[in-house]
């Protein structure tokens, strides 16, 4: 798998041009290294272009955010239902597929991860004709997708959240990792936890949202997402909730595909 680094806008432009004109690069994962504006550290993401990518045509992007303990390769390589469904949705609808580390294994979409995703989107928009962005993920990534959409509704046109939480104020697991990502505990940084809880910012979730949940999920209980989905429906927002009362902390391929198809259809309709 090619590894491409870029340390300036010019180098990033060269990367995109190379990918756009090389048919051999289409549908092949490219590991991109970049310098984060947030703190100057070296960060990574994987990009896969659709088969018939044309730099002159408008493009849509599907961002896939990995779960706790994983990295950018989870949604690129893993055969589990939610990962395969994301790849297949990108391929079927000819979307640019992007899978960031977003500060890797224990991110939870803290400030540094947030800044990295913003930077990736802005650079893609600067070098390609990107007009729509869908953010998705599973578990920690499902949480992160909701958080990022609530923080940056101007950058997000659709959300697919699988087995995530919408309320980090009440969520009580992985607290050490979340505190490290958020810069402190709930007691130390209460505003940070509120800021990153999508359920507490329904006014910002105006884009199509699809969520999958399991009633027996103990790793990330579904309660906050169920409440959020019902509240969004009451506001007549475009929402699809796929809840499996006997389900656990995973989403099967059929349900994940249904979630992606709903959001893609709504985003295309919105064009």
Image: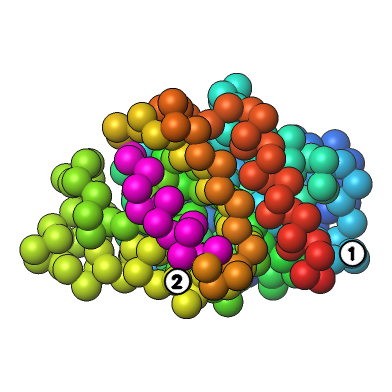
- Front label number (1 vs 2): 2
Whole-percent x, y for residue 158 in the image = 63, 61
Q: Main secondary structure of the magenta part?
A: helix
Task: Tell me, yes or no, if residue 169 can be seen here.
Answer: yes
What residue do we see at 14% from left, 60% from top? Answer: 186
Element under label 2?
helix
Q: Nearer the viewer, residue 137 or 118?
A: 137
| Mark positioned earlier in the residue sequence (1 or 2) | 1
Q: Quadrant of residue 268?
A: bottom right
Q: Which mark is residue 202?
A: 2
Residue 34 within the segment the image draws in magenta: no
Whole-percent x, y for residue 8 in the image = 58, 67
Whole-percent x, y for residue 189 in the image = 16, 67
Separation of residues labelled 1 and 2 (CA atoms): 33 Å
Q: Quickly name the residue at label 1.
A: 57
Q: Which residues are magenta?
A: 220-233
What residue do we see at 25% from left, 64% from top? Answer: 193
Q: Quadrant of residue 163?
A: top left
Whole-percent x, y for residue 130 in the image = 75, 66
Which quadrant holds the C terminus?
bottom right
Task: Tell me, yes or no, if residue 3 can be seen here.
Answer: no
Q: Quadrant of residue 235?
A: bottom right
Q: Find the residue positioned furthest to the top.
A: 79
Looking at the image, how many numbered discs can be counted on the residues?
A: 2
Q: Bin the neighbour count of mark 2 within 10 Å (Cα to Cα): few under 14, some 14-19, many 20 and up.
A: some
């Amino acid at each position: 798998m090619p590894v491409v680094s870029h340390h300036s806008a010019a180098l990033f432009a060269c990367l995109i041009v190379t990918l756009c004109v090389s048919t051999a690069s289409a549908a092949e994962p490219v590991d991109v290294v970049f310098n984060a504006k947030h703190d100057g550290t070296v960060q990574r993401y994987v990009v896969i272009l659709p088969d018939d990518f044309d730099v002159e045509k408008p493009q849509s992007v599907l961002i896939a955010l990995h779960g706790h303990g994983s990295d950018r390769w989870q949604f690129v390589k893993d055969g589990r239902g939610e990962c395969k469904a994301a790849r297949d949705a990108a391929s079927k609808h000819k979307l640019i597929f992007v899978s960031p580390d977003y500060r890797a294994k224990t991110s939870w979409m803290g400030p540094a991860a947030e800044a990295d995703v913003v930077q990736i989107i802005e650079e893609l928009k600067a070098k390609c004709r990107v007009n729509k962005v869908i953010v998705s993920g599973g578990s920690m990534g499902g949480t992160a997708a909701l958080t990022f959409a609530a923080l940056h509704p101007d950058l997000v046109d659709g959300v697919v959240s699988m087995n995530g939480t919408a309320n980090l104020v009440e969520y009580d697991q992985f607290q050490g990792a979340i505190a490290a990502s958020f810069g402190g505990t709930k007691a130390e940084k209460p505003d940070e936890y509120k800021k990153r809880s999508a359920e507490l910012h329904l006014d910002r979730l105006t884009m199509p949202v699809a969520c999958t949940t399991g009633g027996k999920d103990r790793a990330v209980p579904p309660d906050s997402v169920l409440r959020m989905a019902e509240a969004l429906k009451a506001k007549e927002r475009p929402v699809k909730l796929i809840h499996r009362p006997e389900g656990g902390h995973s989403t099967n391929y059929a349900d994940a595909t249904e979630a992606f198809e709903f959001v893609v259809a709504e985003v295309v309709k919105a064009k």
